Image (spheres, rainbow, N blue to C red):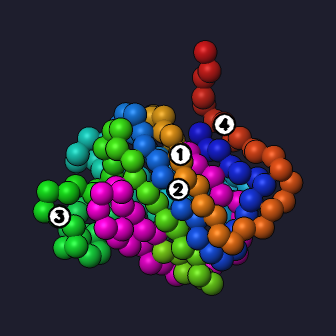
Amino acid sequence: MLLILKNKYIRKGEFRVSFNADKEGVVSIVFKYMNRDNFYLFEISGYTEKDKLFRLRKKISGKMTEIKKIDSVDEIPNATLLNKNEKLLGYDRDVFYQVRILLEKNIIKVFYSNLRTKEIMLFNEKEDDIQYGHVGFGTFMTTAAFDKIVLRPIVATKSIIFLLIRNVHLS
C-alpha cells in the first residue's frame, strides 16, 4: 500500500522522515511520484536477518527496475563509521529510524540512521528519468508509523491526499 501526499511535490531539495515498524516486512519511501506508473522508491526490508536489505528502485512507464541494492553490511559505504555492535542493515521492530533523501539536479542521495548512530549515505546515484513529483510512504506485510516529515523546498498544489491501495483487505 502506498500513501501519496498529493499536496506536496519536490524537484530538488530534501525529503526526510522518521519511521518505526511493528513487525517484519518492507517500509517504502516514495519520491518524484508522477502517477502509479512513474516514481522512485527507497525500500527498507525488516525481514529475517538473512533477508534484510536496502533497495532503490524506479518505475518508469509501468516497468519496475532496481537501481541498486545493499544486502550486506559490508556493502554499506562508510560502514566503518558504525559501532561494531550496531546492525544498521534493514530495520528492527519498534526502533525509530530516519531516512533522508537529497535530490540535486540529476543525483539521488539516500541517507539512513537509527537515531542512535551517525547518519550514513547508502546511495549516490545519477538518475534523471523523472524530474519532479509527489512524495509518500508505503508498507508491505507490516504497519509503520511515520513521524518528523520534512520537505525542503516544497511546492504546494491542491490540498488532497491520494491513497493507492492494491490487494488490501480492511475489516
Picture residue at 34% right of the left edge, 44% below the top: 95
Quickly name the residue at label 3.
83
Q: Amino acid at mark 2?
A: Val
Mark number, residue 100: none
Distance from disc 1 to disc 3, alpha carbons, whole Å, reads 26 Å
Q: Amino acid at mark 1?
A: Phe
Q: Is residue 145 magenta?
A: no
Q: Is residue 69 visible?
A: no
Mark nearest the camera among 4 and 3 is 3
**Regarding mark 3 in the picture, which secondary structure is present there?**
loop
Disc 4 to disc 2, C-alpha distance: 21 Å
Rendered residue at 38%/73% (across/down) = 121
Q: Is residue 128 above or below residue 151?
A: below
Magenta range is: 110-138
The answer to which of 139 and 147 lies nearer the viewer is 147
Choose top left, top right, bottom left or bottom right for residue 33: bottom right
Quadrant of the image containing the N terminus: top right
Pointer 4 or 1: first along the chain: 1
Q: Are marks 4 and 2 in contact (CB under 8 Å)?
A: no
Say which residue label 1 marks: 146
